[in-house]
Structure formats: C-alpha cells, structure tokens
Image (spheres, grey):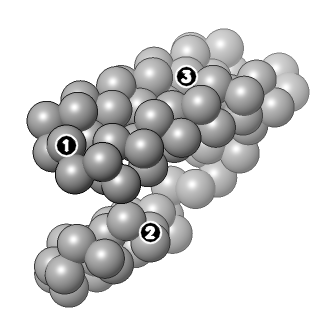
Amino acid sequence: MRILQISGNPWLSSIAKSLYLHVQWVFRLGAAERAPHSWAEHIQLVDAIESGDGDRAERAALDHLEAASAAAYENAEGGYGAR
C-alpha cells in the first residue's frame, strides 16, 4: 500500500485499498508457504523502485502478482477447508 501511496495517484491508492481489504483473507490462507517467496519479491520491487528503474520495477511487480495469484488459485483449488 505504501508504494501506491508514494505513486502520487490517489485514485489508484483508493481502489487498491478497497481491493486489499476485500481479498486479504485469500492471501492469509497460503501465507506460511508464500511468505519467504513474497518477501524476496518485495525486496526486488523495492530495490527496483529505489534504483529508479521503472522497467525493472514493473517486471518485479508483475512477477509478484503472478506468483501471488498462482498461489491463491492453488489454495482455492485445494479447498479452503483443508487447512
């Protein structure tokens, strides 16, 4: 959320916050398995932003979203009651 805040785009921040609040429970289900990978992905994103490399930051963000989406899908496929 902080990255969106510093983007200077209040509309994007508002939409993302609403979405985050509605779906955060999905990500909690796989948090134990995803945490190490997610942490590394966030570090890559922050490093890219700090370096000013927009292309690298975009790629890092998209890679993270893809990995998080795949994990959420796997959790849904496995059934939430299995945990």
Q: For the residue marked with disc 3, what is the amino acid?
A: Ala
Residue wearing tag 3: 71
* Mark 3–mark 1 distance (CA, rounded to whole Å): 27 Å
Earlier-in-chain disc, 2 versus 3: 2
Mark 2 or mark 1, which is nearer to you?
Answer: 1
Which amino acid lies under the numbered mark 2 shown in the image of this protein? Met
Q: Which mark is residue 1?
A: 2
Residue 39 drawn at (x, y percent): 64, 38
Determine crowd level at label 2: few under 14, some 14-19, many 20+ residues with C-alpha closer than 10 A: few
* Mark 2 → mark 3, Cα distance in angstroms: 20 Å
| Residue 2, picture quadrant | bottom left
Left or right, residue 83 beside residue 38: right
Q: Nearer the viewer, residue 10 or 46?
A: 46
Can residue 78 be seen here? The reply is yes
Question: Could you tell which of marks 2 and 1 lies nearer the N-terminus?
Answer: 2
Residue at 22% from the left image edge and 51% from the top image edge:
52
Q: Could you say whether the residue bearing mark 2 is in a helix, strand or loop?
A: loop
Q: Amino acid at mark 1?
A: Asp
What is the distance, in whole Å, between disc 2 and disc 1 at their CAs? Answer: 20 Å
Viewer-side label of 2, 3? 2
User: At which x and y percent is residue 76?
Assistant: 57, 25
> Label 3 crowding class (10 Å Cα cut-off): few <14, some 14-19, many 20+?
some
Name the residue located 59 percent from the left edge and 31 percent from the top edge. 40
Residue 53, disc: 1
Quick one: 24 or 32, which is closer to the camera? 32
Quadrant of the drawing holding the C terminus:
top right
Picture quadrant of residue 63 = top left
Q: Earlier in the sequence, mark 3 or mark 1?
A: 1
Residue at the farthest right position: 83
